[in-house]
Image (cartoon, rainbow, N blue to C red):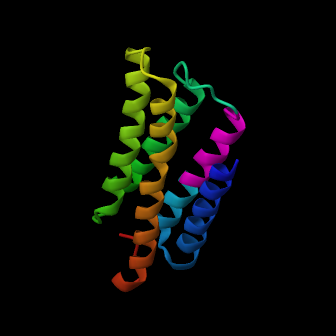
């Protein structure tokens, strides 16, 4: 329970900083992370991780598409980092699909904790947008 509360604290901080200091693309990335997290909480409230979590996989695919689209809209490098981290999450699902003997705990940890580097990169990008003249591109 505390890990979920801690994650949502980091997530809401990221969204707040993106709204306050970020440009349109930083806000879009933060809203993508927020929407994906809320959808995951609602659609997969108690995953057991012993089999592939199809709901979470689908949400992660939509988040990947959103991050990829952000990367196509800018010349900055940070969207490629978040897209790459999200792609690692996708590969975790694909591996579980291909190899059912992967233990539930490593699969769960990869799926859950991959979000933190994404949020930290969005925080960094949001903080550096104003230094770049307030432009999100």
Residue 130 vertical position relative to residue 114 in the rendered view, above or below: below
Residue 50 lies in the magenta-colored region? no
Residue 43 lies in the magenta-colored region? yes
| Image quarter hosting the C terminus | bottom left
Residue 41 vertical position relative to residue 127 in the rendered view, above or below: above
Between residues 21 and 8, which one lies in front from this camera angle?
Answer: 8
Q: Residue at x 37, y 85 (%)?
A: 131
Q: Does residue 45 appear left or right of residue 70 in this picture?
A: right
Q: Residue at x 46, y 68 (%)?
A: 123
Q: Does residue 9 appear left or right of residue 75 in this picture?
A: right
Residue 17 vertical position relative to residue 117 in the rendered view, above or below: below
Picture quadrant where residue 81 is located? bottom left
Between residues 45 and 69, which one lies in front from this camera angle?
Answer: 45
Picture quadrant where residue 73 is located? bottom left
Percent across and percent down for residue 5 are 68, 55
Percent across and percent down for residue 89 are 42, 38
Q: Residue at x 62, y 49 (%)?
A: 35
Q: Does residue 56 appear left or right of residue 68 in this picture?
A: right
Percent across and percent down for residue 7 are 60, 55
| Predominant SS of the magenta segment | helix
Q: How many marks?
A: 0
Where are the magenta residues, as a range?
Answer: 33-45
Q: Residue at x 37, y 23 (%)?
A: 95
Picture quadrant where residue 51 is located? top right
């Amino acid at each position: 329970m505390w890990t979920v509360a801690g994650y949502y604290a980091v997530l809401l901080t990221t969204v707040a900083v993106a709204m306050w200091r970020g440009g349109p693309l930083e806000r879009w990335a933060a809203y993508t992370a927020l929407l994906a997290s809320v959808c995951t909480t609602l659609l997969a409230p108690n995953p057991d991780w012993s089999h592939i979590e199809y709901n979470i996989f689908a949400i992660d695919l939509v988040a990947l598409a959103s991050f990829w689209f952000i990367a196509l809209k800018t010349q900055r490098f940070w969207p490629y980092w978040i897209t790459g981290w999200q792609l690692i999450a996708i590969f975790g699902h694909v591996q579980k699909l291909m190899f059912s003997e992967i233990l539930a705990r490593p699969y769960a940890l990869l799926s859950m904790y991959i979000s933190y580097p994404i949020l930290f990169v969005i925080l960094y990008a949001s903080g550096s947008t104003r230094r770049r003249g307030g432009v999100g591109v």
